[in-house]
Image (cartoon, rainbow, N blue to C red):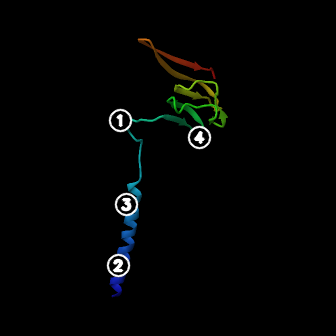
Amino acid sequence: MNRELIFLRTFAFTAAIGIVFLTASAFKISGNQKFTEIDVERINIVEKDGTVKMIITNVGKFPTGEEKINSRPTNKTRKKRSGMLFFNEEGIECGGFIYDGQKKSERPQFRVISNLRPV
């Protein structure tokens, strides 16, 4: 009876360790994730410390004057458009590419506006 008790305790301990190991290894993600297609409304590229370096956004998620990026207010007077915004090492907006288009009569009109400030 004592041998059976030792066997059962050893079996229970080994099974518990095995379950913990399998659970931990099941949720481990190694390497980069790969996707064939991603649908998003806004992508924020950030440094390890959380500083925003670049924003890729649609019209609806474009930063307005109420939103702060890197603890700084954004431009209130700018029209909301889709595009990219860049931020320098100090977290200040330093330029971007903005896409705009509209259809007047039969020919659509498109504009790409770029504004890059020297560092």
Residue drawn 58% across and 35% down?
Answer: 52
Q: Does residue 11 lie above or below 91 as drawn? A: below
Find disc 2 in the rendering and name its residue.
Answer: 8
Give the number of the disc on residue 36.
Answer: 1
Q: Which percent across, then down, holds residue 37?
A: 37, 35
Rounded to the nearest whole Å, what is the CA distance between mark 4 and mark 1?
27 Å
The mark lying in front, picked from 4 and 3, is: 4
- Total marks shown come to 4
Q: Which residue is mark 3?
A: 22
Image location of residue 89, percent across then percent down? 63, 31
Mark 3 crowd level (few <14, some 14–19, many ≥20, 10 Å Cα):
few
> Which of the numbered marks, if any, corresponds to residue 52?
none
Query: Residue 78 at x, y = what percent?
Result: 61, 24
Which type of secondary structure does the marked residue at label 1 adopt?
loop
Q: Does label 1 or label 3 sit earlier along the sequence?
A: 3
Q: Amino acid at mark 3?
A: Leu
Q: CA distance from mark 2 to mark 4?
A: 51 Å
* Local secondary structure at mark 3: helix
**Camera-nearest label, 1 or 3:** 1
Looking at the rendering, which quadrant does residue 5 occupy? bottom left
> Residue flagged by tag 4: what amino acid is it?
Gly
Amino acid of disc 1: Thr
| Residue lying at 33% horizontally and 88% vertically, measured from the top left | 1
Tell me which corner region of the image, top left, top right, bottom left or bottom right, holds residue 55.
top right
Could you tell which of marks 2 and 1 lies nearer the N-terminus?
Answer: 2
- Residue 50: mark in rendering: 4
Q: Residues within 10 Å of mark 4 (few under 14, many from 20)?
A: few
